[in-house]
Image (spheres, rainbow, N blue to C red):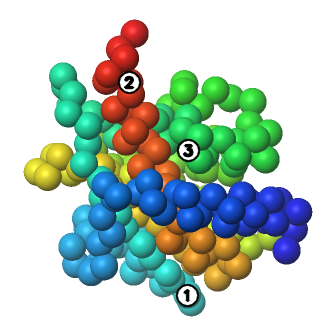
Amino acid sequence: MSTRSCLIATALVSAGSIIYASTQNVCQIHRLCETPPAFQRMVHQPRRFTKWGFWTSPLPPSSGPVAVDDLARALFTATPYKLELILTQVEQDPAHFKIEPGNRLGNMLVLLRPSEDQAVFEYKAPPDFDWVLYLGINRVSDEAEIGFVDWSRSTLQHVGERVYTPWLLQAACAKLRNHDANPK
């Protein structure tokens, strides 16, 4: 395992118990048929190994609709993602990152925008990280959605699936809530 992998694993595992308690508003979806079609297509990609997780969290009540761009910016500027930005030495300000296919923030690449309310990101990094992140806004239930599809069999996959991804969603929604409470 590389130094980078060890740092990430140590940070995530040590924070895991604290984080798990703070994700009470995050609901895990266990049946693939209950996820959006764009996410289902990612899971059904022909790969030799696929592990997935999908979570939802209520969007904060606000004066207007939240866009998936707002959710992505909140996620990339939230505390849980800062370690990734530091380790990859990203010079770009994540607050100004444009969620358009082909744009990159560190190891995270915007793959596609299936709709105005959805974005799909790909993450690849040595030694064996290969996963996709789905972000969406469900307008019917007024929830933020995050999905994680891992094709890598990485040693950190279970930490990402069970701890890091729901933590990212909770942090992004909290950041959106704080922004609504303290508008500029």
Residue 46: image location, x then y, percent: 48, 84
- CA gap between label 2 and label 3 equals 28 Å
Within-10-Å neighbours for mark 3: few <14, some 14–19, many 20+: few
Within-10-Å neighbours for mark 2: few <14, some 14–19, many 20+: some
- CA gap between label 3 and label 1 equals 25 Å
Observer-side mark, 2 or 1, equals 2
Q: Is the residue under label 1 in contact with that under label 3 (CB below 8 Å)?
A: no
Q: Is residue 102 left or right of residue 116?
A: right
Residue 110: image location, x then y, percent: 52, 48
Residue 179: mark: 2
> Which residue in the structure is indicated by mark 3?
102
Q: In this view, does 175 lie to the left or right of 29?
A: right
**In the rendered image, is residue 10 in sight?**
yes
Q: Which of 113 and 161 is in front in this view?
A: 161
Which quadrant holds the N terminus? bottom right
- Amino acid type for the residue under numbered disc 2: His
| SS type, badge 3 | loop
Please give the name of the residue rendered at 87% of the width and 68% of the height, measured from the top-left corner: 2
